Image: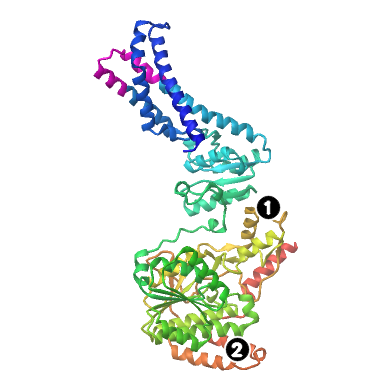
Amino acid sequence: MNNLKRMKVIIFIITDMMLVNFSYVVSYYLRFNFSFPGRELEVYKRNALIITLVYIATFFLFKFYKSLWNYAGMDEFMLTIVACILASIECSLIFLKLNSILPLSIRIMAAGISIIFILGFRMSFRIARRYHTFFKRRKYRNAKNVMIIGAGQAATMVIKEMQRCKALNYKPRVMIDDDRNKHGTYVAGVKVMGNRTRIIPLAIRYKIDEILIAISSIDEKNKKALFDICIETGCKVKLIPGIYEIIDGKITLNNIRDVNIEDLLEREPVKLNMEFINDYIRSKIVIVTGGGGSIGSELCRQIVKYNPKQLIILENYENSAYDLQQEFRRKGIKIDIRFIIASIRDKKRINYIFNEYRPEIVFHTAAHKHAPLMEENPVEAIKNNIFGTLNLAECADKYGVEKFVMISTDKAANPTNIMGATKKVCEMIVQSMSYKSRTKFLAVRFGNLLGSNGSIVPLFLKQIREGGPIAVAHRDVYKFFMSIPEAAQLVLQTPTLAKGGEVFALDMGEPVNIYDLACKIIKLSGMEPNKDIAIEFVGLQPGEKLYEELSTSEEGLRKTSNKQIFICKPTFYIFELLKKQLDEIQKVVEKENEEDNKEVIIKMLEELVPTYKRYNMREEEKVLEIQYNNILAK
């Protein structure tokens, strides 16, 4: 204990001794009609030392002198009452033992008065701190006016922290809660002024700068509806960590975060059957191709939780592999992890890797995925996506892999671009291989991943940081979105549902209008669309659809035991026929002059994938665009 702390304890002890004795003196004064008795007071004087020692010892027992009374709350309040009552009872027992005649009325009054004096003394520190903070904060006129949604424990803690810490620069003005019983009440001096219907008018009335959401439990539908209301206020919207996260020390109030686009997706949280996943991964050799990419790296992060015997991360781009390697080292992952730099297009290299490591489970995420780039480079898309997948599938069959999971895309359903068509062929490889192999082959189809490399949300954020404009293809473009972690978790679930040859489609929720998404991102950044940040329509990219699809009418969607995963009906079975067609395509691909071969290859791809139609938009979508442009012209 340093000198300052020791001095504070001594001052507290001396003050408590004085207050306890003063309580007894006041009790005598009240008991004898506001006059000091002589003979009766002598009894107290003989026992004053015992009384003082008992009270101080009890206070030590209750750790009074280790509490931070500047921040005293209900717990300290109750402890003081209990300690004073207990000390009074102890004194009474001692007096009984010593046959000391100290009036019962004096002892009872003294206990009550000591509670008042000692509590008053300690609470004065908190009151002084509150007024000090209040007058100090009045000097900071640039503090942000804040509305807090949710009048629970987390909100209470945050308000107190705001009032205490000037560095946060927040001024809580009003609270919102859907519980009617809380309306009109005060939380740490801030009034609860209604439910969510009052958010917009109160934000205007109190000139709110930021809205902090402090609701620990809310379903996804209500959460999205709440966010939509908050966004309409034009205020910056942030989320407060859950009360249990704050208590556990995992995060601090400085971790109040911005609302992410993931928070706006109206979808139930992903639910996993952990036991089944653990059963097929634990103590197995697992390989992840494209392991440094967005979905590949997240799969690796999830897989290590299930204790595989060995995790092989195969990546063609060394920088992303290096970043993941360093991440695992920082986290102290103890599992045997091997990082291999290789291309899935290199058949000999892939054969060597499978022969050397003998993987039992393969997650194949490596692919060229950017549709506009692949329109300009169809030969590369075919080499990497189709023949890379074929190399892996044949090696999986040859070396007896148990499960082979290929990551596909919603663009494989009725493809209108090269990338989607090549991924459809990959699905055909997986489906047909399953009918001739002991390996369980399956594919998982989903849409855009929020936050993945080159995806639309990071692009919008970058354009906002640069002052705009945000480039949107078309007013009526709709796309499916899913967060990377939840996509990875569902991918891990699919092998537990597979019999072999399935194409699984993940529940992506409702498709999102890209123009509306751009507006929301601008508003979440505290700005106004087409005022602070312009939105420009730049036209659809070659091969881009207005509406994405997760399945074709021929495939349909069948439910599984997990309501977030569906099965598409198999549409291709004969591997030998497919292999013969792929051999013909490979002969053309390997010719030197790719530009001359481009059209030939695309036509061959159209023959291989009957649902592939090379339009920037389908015919009905062209009609929609013409109608929309006519409206704008009027």
Residue that protrudes farthest toward the right in the picture: 633
Residue 570: percent from left, percent from top: 43, 79
Toward the viewer: 412 or 307?
307
Which image quarter holds the C terminus? Answer: bottom right
Q: Name the residue located 49 percent from the left edge and 86 percent from the top edge.
A: 349
Residue 93 within the magenta-colored segment of the rendering = yes
Q: Quadrant of residue 491?
A: bottom left
Can residue 490 be seen here? The reply is: yes
Q: Quadrant of residue 357?
A: bottom left
Q: Is residue 414 left or right of residue 532?
A: left
Q: Main secondary structure of the magenta part?
A: helix
Residue extent of the magenta highlight: 89-113
* Numbered disc 1: secondary structure: loop
Q: Name the residue located 50 percent from the left edge and 88 percent from the top edge.
A: 347
* Numbered disc 2: secondary structure: helix
Mark 2 crowdedness (10 Å alpha carbons): few <14, some 14-19, many ≥20: many
Question: Which residue has dot 2 on it?
Answer: 601
Q: Name the residue located 65 percent from the left edge and 62 percent from the top edge.
A: 460
How far apart, in angstroms, are the residues tagged by discs 2 and 1?
47 Å
Residue 167: percent from left, percent from top: 61, 43
Marked residue nearer the N-terminal end (2 or 1): 1
For the rendered model, the colour scheme is: rainbow
Toward the viewer: 302 or 490?
302
Where is 13 relative to 417, above or below? above
Residue 335: percent from left, percent from top: 41, 70
Question: Which residue has dot 1 on it?
Answer: 527
Q: Are marks 2 and 1 in contact (CB under 8 Å)?
A: no
Q: Is residue 515 left or right of residue 92?
A: right
